[in-house]
Amino acid sequence: MIDTFLPGYLLSLSLIVAIGAQNAFVLRQGLRRQHVFWVCLTCGLSDAILIVAGVAGFGALAEKAPWFETAMRYGGAVFLLWYGWRNARSAWEGGHVLQAENGAGAPLVPTVLTLLALTWLNPHVYLDTVVLIGSISAQYDNRLVFGAGAVLASISFFFALGYGARLLAPLFARASSWRVLDGLIALTMWAIAAGLLFA
């Protein structure tokens, strides 16, 4: 079971950890210590819904149309190669620094609504969760365990980022830290793509 759970966990973590608007928002809230629990919970539940939809929906579709699994496997590999290349380029160029903004915090409802917009209006979130995680889950006999690993990775990451923000802020205020992280993400994405192409 760990052979199925761990790949789901690592894949989801690799996709989520990349710098982006959602993570920047969570980090800022964590640095400000404002609505941290609700921000992290909103992110985790949103990802959980999308991941479950991908794992369940993709499995049902793959059974009705066997060719779809193959198409998505190669499509997922192409996406992973591109995603890895993007992170590799980011690691090479550097210059990314994540800093919290100063100023008074917004009330809870506007904060959550902003976060929901950042999450659900981002087209990449559907590629990462529904399409990519859903397609890769079809390679495993127990898709639910794979999906559970992916969901746990998302929830644990957002809570770690939100509550650990004050500890992480000095580290990720340096561009070199993001270069190392982007490089590791690129290698992980390429390794997963190779696994899909040569499975």
Image (spheres, rainbow, N blue to C red):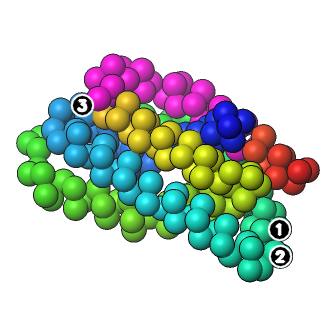
Name the mark nearer the viewer: 3 or 1: 1
Quadrant placement of the N terminus: top right
In this picture, which residue range is highlighted in magenta? 163-190
Which residue lies under the disc numbered 1?
70
Mark 1: secondary structure: helix
List x then y, in percent, for residue 85: 71, 48
Dot 2 surroundings within 10 Å: few (below 14), some, or many (20 or more)?
Answer: few
The total number of labels drawn is 3
Please tell me which of labels 3 and 2 falls first in the chain.
3
In the image, which disc is placed on residue 58?
none
x and y percentages locating residue 189 in the rendered image = 70, 44
Amino acid type assigned to the residue bearing label 1 in the image: Thr
Q: Classify residue 178 as left or right of residue 138.
A: left
Mark 2, residue position: 67
Q: Residue furthest right?
A: 198
Q: Quadrant of residue 82?
A: bottom right
Gap in angstroms between the C-alphas marked 2 and 1? 5 Å
Name above or below for residue 72 compared with residue 101: below
Magenta stretch, overall SS: helix
Dot 2 falls on a residue whose secondary structure is: helix
Q: Residue at x 63, y 39 (%)?
A: 5
At 48% from the left edge and 41% from the top edge, which residue is drawn? Answer: 152
> Comparing marks 3 and 2, which lies closer to the viewer?
2
Label disc, if present, on residue 31 of the rendered structure: 3
Q: Are marks 2 and 1 in contact (CB under 8 Å)?
A: yes
Decide: few, some or many residues near mark 1? Use Cα within 10 Å; few <14, some 14-19, many ≥20.
some
State left or right for residue 87 relative to residue 32.
right
Coordinates of residue 175 in the picture (x, y in percent): 49, 28
